[in-house]
């Protein structure tokens, strides 16, 4: 019993969900990074703008700093409504001119370097703890030139981070909302697509379960090209099954008939023998009964051997078989029985052939063909068995010929003699009518072909042609 | 019920200990708790305020009716003095700090002295009336000009600053030594209003010159200025708090209160809870009351101070205020813009201008009220 290992649907959903989650997590993470950077940059700009406005309003007047900070500098800071702000204006001697006197971590060395080298302001950003909160500072250095003195002034403006955090959170949350929505919509769409794609499998399953066990006609379903081979295989398998089943039915009916007729004959002959008073006649009748029972035994044996063979086909794998050896052995076994019929068996051929096959089955086949040949041979004639290699149309094949000198088979009967229980109308010899059909089945099982030819002057040639296949080898 | 109420009021009146510090103009007032004899340990809510105690006491009363076990110790002084005391005496900080000097209050909050409190009552007041959850504006008061209408002699009262300047010019020496101003170096509110004028108006320079040439008198608080006006020591008082001035106008018909029609500065009184308050829970309850419809209603009806809430009805509500003749209301924003007012460099500039105007012409026109 086949066990379902994993569901395609579950695997698909799992994979799709995993991919989606990974994509969304990456998207969220990048949105988060972007949000933080965007918020940082925009609020840094405000801070810088404020510091610039302060810097513009610091001048030297009569060797003294003149500081008149504009309201707009503070209005710029006030744009982040919920943040504290701190500032300080410091001169070159590190004395605080106005503003907060205890701002931390002021990068004086960097500032000095900048104000001496650069003409433009380059803001220096840094973060520090001040009054219990993290504060983002910007520091600017400005060099004021008067007639013969150089004065540096440093502008430090800082602001707490609430507004930027709020802005970053807002952007992140918007991204989160979008990504969540996107996730569920895509997931739903993909679930629908998966359902849609797997629908044909469901349809096939449905179609098969709804059938009665006897119905073996091909399944009709519209399926995508990927699933079509599966359907084709199923249909092919069912056609085979149908074929086998009908053959079996026919065989069973024929077999029943074939056994019933001789049994009825036996019955009446035995009745006659009982009633017979003449001892000589009764002996003769008993002789008939024995013959009939022999025929019947033969038939039953054949049927059994066929059943054995059918079973072997399914259970026995092929192995290398020496064909010439099997033929010789079969001939040897039959030679005594042939001589009783006053028929000789002659084996011709000196090649050695090995094929992949079932030795027991092959022997059955040979036995049946040769017995059949002997049966139809006139007394004193010879049955020739020959194994040869033929090159035809660049294809090499091994051919076994069994030639007899009997009356032969008319052309109209040739195609029927392999059918079960077929006997030509003019045939009066005893036989089961099953031997050749078994032989043919064995041959087909080995991919070999049967061919019937007329012998000269009279008689039949049965040809079994083993095609050139893997596992076939021969040497002269 | 009524009897007990009257008794309580008597008790308050009797037990009210009023000390006046003559030099610093400091008043200490105790409002004892309602239901506990004072010899037992009681909860004390310490409040510093630059609000006239008569104006604020209805709120204290309402608070004590809600929390009868709490005594309130109220210290009243001028805005700058309260600020300096707050900074210089960290061990004596109050539980609630009330002041109209928005810049000083803001500086304290910005510098981290205020306790954050998400008052549930914040939804009752406009959004821009508080900064973070630390500084809470609770009034909406115009800065006005008051004058003795006797000097007009039939002339129309000066509605704008321009008209005021014309009046001063036409009366000339009649007004020498007769103009009252806040001493901007002593009063935080005076500095705030004056510096804000500097940002708003082009008449600022000419006003300053006119005040200087007429040897304006300088006062540290609104009440003393109004007192001087009443006594005839001055005829014009510039930039004082509307609430008190309107009350006096009501009482004394010859005192006229004018909201300048060019623009009318609006200030908010603000409250915050210091971070090192002894009784933060009591203080929070006080803030809640202050911002609640009930507290705002008391302000509009009993205190005579226009509350910040637009929904409250009463004789001093914002509705009533806007019915009086006024210019564009220019509320001083409660935000980082206020830092400019506390900037030392800026302060020195304004002081210098002020001193130049006030003291160059006549050095002996003393500013002591």
Image (cartoon, coloured by chain):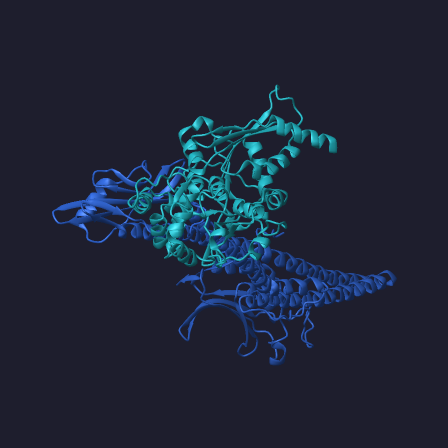
Chain colours: A blue, B cyan
Task: List x then y, in percent, for residue B114.
Answer: 47, 37
User: Closest to the observer: A224 or B30?
Assistant: B30
From the image, which quarter does the C terminus of chain A lie in? bottom left
User: Closest to the observer: B89 or B209?
Assistant: B209
Kindly identify the residue that appears in the image at 62 percent across and 29 percent down: B13
User: Closest to the observer: B229 or A223?
Assistant: B229
Task: List x then y, in percent, for residue A135.
Answer: 37, 41
| Rendered position, B323 above or below B334 | below
| Rendered position, B260 above or below B62 | below
| Rendered position, B117 above or below A322 | above
Position of A224 compared to B8: left or right? left
Position of A449 compared to A208: left or right? left
User: Quick one: which residue is furthest to the top in this view?
Assistant: B39
State how many labels appear: 0
Q: Report whether residue B134 is seen.
A: no
Task: List x then y, in percent, for residue B271.
Answer: 51, 40
Kindly identify the residue that appears in the image at 54 percent across and 76 percent down: A453
Task: List x then y, in percent, for residue A152.
Answer: 20, 45
User: Quick one: which residue is furthest to the left in this view?
Assistant: A148
Q: Quadrant of residue A393?
A: bottom left
Q: Report whether residue B253 is seen.
A: yes
């Amino acid at each position: 019993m086949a066990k379902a290992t994993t569901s395609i649907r579950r695997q698909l959903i799992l994979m799709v969900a995993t991919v989606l989650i990974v994509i969304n997590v990456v998207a969220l993470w990048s949105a988060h990074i972007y949000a933080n950077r965007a918020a940082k940059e925009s609020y840094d700009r405000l801070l810088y703008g404020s510091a610039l406005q302060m810097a513009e309003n610091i001048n030297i007047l009569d060797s003294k700093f003149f500081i008149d900070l504009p309201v707009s500098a503070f209005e710029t800071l006030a744009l982040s409504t919920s943040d504290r702000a701190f500032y300080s204006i410091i001169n070159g001697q590190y004395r605080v001119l106005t503003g907060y006197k205890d701002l931390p971590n002021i990068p004086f060395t960097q500032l000095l370097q900048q104000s001496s080298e650069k003409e433009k302001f380059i803001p220096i950003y840094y973060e520090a703890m001040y009054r219990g909160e993290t504060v983002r500072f910007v520091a600017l250095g400005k060099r004021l030139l008067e007639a013969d003195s150089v004065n540096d002034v440093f502008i430090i403006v800082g602001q707490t981070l609430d507004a930027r955090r709020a802005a970053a959170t807002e952007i992140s949350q918007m991204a989160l909302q979008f990504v969540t929505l996107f996730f569920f919509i895509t997931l739903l769409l993909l679930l629908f697509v998966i359902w849609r794609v797997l629908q044909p499998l469901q349809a096939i399953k449905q179609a098969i379960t709804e059938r009665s066990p006897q119905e073996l006609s091909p399944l009709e379903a519209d399926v995508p090209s990927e699933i079509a081979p599966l359907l084709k295989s199923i249909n092919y398998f069912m056609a085979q099954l149908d074929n086998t089943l009908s053959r079996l039915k026919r065989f069973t009916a024929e077999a029943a008939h074939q056994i019933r007729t001789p049994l009825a004959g036996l019955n009446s002959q035995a009745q006659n023998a009982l009633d017979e008073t003449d001892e000589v006649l009764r002996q003769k009748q008993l002789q008939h009964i024995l013959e009939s029972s022999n025929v019947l035994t033969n038939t039953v044996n054949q049927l059994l051997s066929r059943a054995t063979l059918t079973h072997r086909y399914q259970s026995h794998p092929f192995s290398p078989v020496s064909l010439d050896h099997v033929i010789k052995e079969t001939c040897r076994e039959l030679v005594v029985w042939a001589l009783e019929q006053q028929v000789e068996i002659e084996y011709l051929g000196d090649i050695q052939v090995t094929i992949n096959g079932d030795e027991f089955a092959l022997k059955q086949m040979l036995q049946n063909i040769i017995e059949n040949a002997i049966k139809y041979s006139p007394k004193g004639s010879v049955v020739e068995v020959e194994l040869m290699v033929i090159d035809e149309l660049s294809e090499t094949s091994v051919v076994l010929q069994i030639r007899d000198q009997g009356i032969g088979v008319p052309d109209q009967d040739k195609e029927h003699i392999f059918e079960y229980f077929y006997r030509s109308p003019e045939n009066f010899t005893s036989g089961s009518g099953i031997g050749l059909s078994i032989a043919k089945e064995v041959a087909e099982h080995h991919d070999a072909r049967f061919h019937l030819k007329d012998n000269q002057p009279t008689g039949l040639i049965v040809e079994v042609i083993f095609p050139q296949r893997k596992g076939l080898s021969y040497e002269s | 019920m009524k009897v007990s109420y009257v008794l309580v009021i008597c008790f308050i009146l009797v037990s009210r200990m009023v000390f006046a510090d003559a030099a610093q103009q400091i008043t200490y007032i105790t409002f004892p708790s309602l239901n506990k004899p004072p010899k037992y340990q009681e909860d004390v809510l310490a409040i510093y305020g630059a609000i006239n105690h008569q104006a604020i006491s209805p709120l204290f009363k309402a608070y004590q009716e809600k929390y009868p076990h709490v005594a309130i110790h109220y210290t009243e002084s001028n805005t700058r003095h309260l600020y300096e005391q707050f900074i210089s005496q960290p061990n004596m900080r109050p539980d609630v700090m009330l002041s109209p000097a928005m810049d000083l209050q803001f500086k304290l909050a910005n510098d981290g002295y205020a306790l954050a409190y998400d008052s549930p009552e914040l939804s009752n007041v406009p959004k821009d009336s508080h900064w973070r959850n630390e500084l809470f504006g609770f009034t909406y008061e115009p800065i006005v000009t008051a004058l003795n209408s006797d000097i007009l002699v039939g002339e129309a009262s000066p509605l704008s600053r321009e008209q005021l300047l014309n009046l001063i010019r036409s009366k000339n020496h009649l007004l020498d030594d007769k103009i009252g101003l806040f001493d901007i170096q002593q009063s935080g509110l005076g500095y705030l209003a004056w510096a804000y004028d500097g940002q708003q108006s082009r008449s600022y320079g000419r006003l300053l010159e006119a005040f200087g040439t007429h040897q304006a008198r300088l006062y540290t608080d609104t009440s003393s200025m109004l007192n001087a006006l009443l006594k005839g020591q001055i005829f014009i008082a510039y930039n004082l708090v509307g609430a008190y001035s309107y009350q006096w106008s009501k009482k004394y018909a010859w005192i006229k209160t004018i909201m300048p029609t060019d623009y009318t500065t609006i200030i908010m009184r603000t409250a915050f809870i210091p971070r090192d308050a002894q009784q933060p829970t009591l203080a929070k309850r006080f803030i809640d009351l202050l911002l609640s419809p009930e507290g705002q209603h008391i302000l509009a009806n009993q205190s005579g101070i226009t509350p910040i809430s637009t929904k409250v009805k009463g004789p001093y509500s914002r509705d009533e205020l806007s019915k009086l003749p006024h210019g564009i209301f220019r509320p001083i924003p409660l935000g980082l813009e206020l830092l400019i007012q506390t900037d030392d460099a800026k302060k020195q500039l304004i002081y210098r201008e002020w001193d130049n105007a006030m003291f160059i012409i006549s050095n002996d026109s003393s500013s002591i009220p």
